[in-house]
């Protein structure tokens, strides 16, 4: 009898349809999703039977590789089993029942081929599959809507492990081995659309490169040390409840960090990973970008926030891609690094865009795919199959300009207000006679030297005058002394 862990959920929110009979090249050979002659059998064979003593001390619904005391019905046609040793998973419930765990395939959720196995449990997941060689596509629910509270262990020999949309709450402190002690080889771990509140103090698989915990309930990341994720390069914490990034010690190996859709209000006191190249901050509560960014950053997304202005922001010197779309900008003074290749200012009512001649030339070199278009919907794919990649979504980019020296047409479409180069400081030199490295402008140094010379002359004159007066007084005193008689 099914336990109370079953729950109704709007599966349409999370269901992702995959075109059935996808042929893909995985691990060197063609891979075809099998037919599903009877879709009802997929869920009908979900439940298994405990053998021997089952699994002891189960107090919450547990996902695990400890399945030795579980027996399942013959697998239904169309189910993609995990046959590798250590790859099988099951779900134990507090009432003693057990259910089948993940399936294994060589395609991701979109039907795209990958280089290894995807070992996945996706609650309520529905995909289109063929019922027979007639290629009649029907929606098939692969996994039921079920709550899983705790992950005890991960499967061993799968490059990607997915546990999505199951209300997951906690992770075991050691996810580096199976329950039988076999090392977990996963390079990508995805646990999206769950209820995780923390990923602290968890030892993740040693080869893990990508960790995705999007749409959970994480409000802080306190202890995610290098020892716990020794190979991590990409961390996705989107749509959680992080109020700040201050105090987080990110692994030094991290090159990609995505924290879209959190509650972040500023970037004060953030210790950035030293080699971070991609940072996504979209959909947070920030009002400014005047912060110190990672020096090697190449890709920055700060879209969908009420920034109002980015004037004065010092963007990283290696930045190549910048997304400031939908950030309430009305005026912009271009101050971008020479490395910039892609700029998105979509959905900003810009009425004054200023640029020096050098910055105008930089803007002219932008490589956005549709940089001459201003009324394109970026959510609609273009004829060549890529999203509409535009720079501006208005033609009024010079409507309110003031104090400019001219207007130039960017890409022959967008009027940009040209301004003078900012004044440069005069050249500097060392102060003469100084044995320190302190420097000042030449004019200041000259004035200082003249002042010092005059001071020396005046001092010498005063000293000489005092000495002369003293000698005169001494001479007069000696002449007035009375003569002595014998």
Image (cartoon, grey):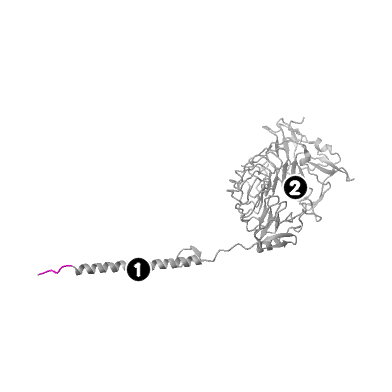
Q: Dividing the picture into quarters, in which one does residue 448 lie? A: bottom left
Question: Which SS does the magenta portion mostly show?
Answer: loop
Q: Characterize the local packing of mark 1: few (<14), some (14-19) or many (20 or more) Cα atoms within 10 angstroms.
A: few
Please give left or right for residue 179 compared with residue 45 in the image: left
Q: To which quarter of the image does residue 398 belong?
A: bottom right
> In front of the other: label 2 or label 1?
1
Residue 320 visible in the current orientation? no
Determine the residue located farthest toward the left in the rendered image: 486
**x then y, percent, for residue 453:** 41, 68
Is residue 171 covered in magenta? no
User: Residue at the location (71% across, 33% down)?
Assistant: 93
For marks 2 and 1 on the same chain, the one whose residue lies earlier in the sequence? 2
Give the residues drawn in magenta, as a range: 481-485
Residue 205 on image: x %, y %: 66, 46
The answer, for residue 197, to whether it is visible in the render is yes
Pinpoint residue 352: horizontal percent, then vertical percent: 68, 56
Between 447 and 139, which is closer to the camera in this rendering? 447
Q: Secondary structure at mark 1?
A: helix
Q: Position of residue 476 (x, y in %)?
A: 22, 68
Mark 2 Cα within 10 Å, few/some/many (few <14, many 20+)?
many
Taking the image as shown, residue 243 lies to the left or right of residue 145, namely left
Quarter containing the C terminus:
bottom left
Q: Residue at x 42, y 66 (%)?
A: 452
Q: Which label number is shown at residue 117?
A: 2
Farthest-out residue, right: 134
| CB under 8 Å between discs 2 and 1 | no
Q: Is residue 24 left or right of residue 275?
A: right
**Residue linked to disc 1:** 461
């Amino acid at each position: 009898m099914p336990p109370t862990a079953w729950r109704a959920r709007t599966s349409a929110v999370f269901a992702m349809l995959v075109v059935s009979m996808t042929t893909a090249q995985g691990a060197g050979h063609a891979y075809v999703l099998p037919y599903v002659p009877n879709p009802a059998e997929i869920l009908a064979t979900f439940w298994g039977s405990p053998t021997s003593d089952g699994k002891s001390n189960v107090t919450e619904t547990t996902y695990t590789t400890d399945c030795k005391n579980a027996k399942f019905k013959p697998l239904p046609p169309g189910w993609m089993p995990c046959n590798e040793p250590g790859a099988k998973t099951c779900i134990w419930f507090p009432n003693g029942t057990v259910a089948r765990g993940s399936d294994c395939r060589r395609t991701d959720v979109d039907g795209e081929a990958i280089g290894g196995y995807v070992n996945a449990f996706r609650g309520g997941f529905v995909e289109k599959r063929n019922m027979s060689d007639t290629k009649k596509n029907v929606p098939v629910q692969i996994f039921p809507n079920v709550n899983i509270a705790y992950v005890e262990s991960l499967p061993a020999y799968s490059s990607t492990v997915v546990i999505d949309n199951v209300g997951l709450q906690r992770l075991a402190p050691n996810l580096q081995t199976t329950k039988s002690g076999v090392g977990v080889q996963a390079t990508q771990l995805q646990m999206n659309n769950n209820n995780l509140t923390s990923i602290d103090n968890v030892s993740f698989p040693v080869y893990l490169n990508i960790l995705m915990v999007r749409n959970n309930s994480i409000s802080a990341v306190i202890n995610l040390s290098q020892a716990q994720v020794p190979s991590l390069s990409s961390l996705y914490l989107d749509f959680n409840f992080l109020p700040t990034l201050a105090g987080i010690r990110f692994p030094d190996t991290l090159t990609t960090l995505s924290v879209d859709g959190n509650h972040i209000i500023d970037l004060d006191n953030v210790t950035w990973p030293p080699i971070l190249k991609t940072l996504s901050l979209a959909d947070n509560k920030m009002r400014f970008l005047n912060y110190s960014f990672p020096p090697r950053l190449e890709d920055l997304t700060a879209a969908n926030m009420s920034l109002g202005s980015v004037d004065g922001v010092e963007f990283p010197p290696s930045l190549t891609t910048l997304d400031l779309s939908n950030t309430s900008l009305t005026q912009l003074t271009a101050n971008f690094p020479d490395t910039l290749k892609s700029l998105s200012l979509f959905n900003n009512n810009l009425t004054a865009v200023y640029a020096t001649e050098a910055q105008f030339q930089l803007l002219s070199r932008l490589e956005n795919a549709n940089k001459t278009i201003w009324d394109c919907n970026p959510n609609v794919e273009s004829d060549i199959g890529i999203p509409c990649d535009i720079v501006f979504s208005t033609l009024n980019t010079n409507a309110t300009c003031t104090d400019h020296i001219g207007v130039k047409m960017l890409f022959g479409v967008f009027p940009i207000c040209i301004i003078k180069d900012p004044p440069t400081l005069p050249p500097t030199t060392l102060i003469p006679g100084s044995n320190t490295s302190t420097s000042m402008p030449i004019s200041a140094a000259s004035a200082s030297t003249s002042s010092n010379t005059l001071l020396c002359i005046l001092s010498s004159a005063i000293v000489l005058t005092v000495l002369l007066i003293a000698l005169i007084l001494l001479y007069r005193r000696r002449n007035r002394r009375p003569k002595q008689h014998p």
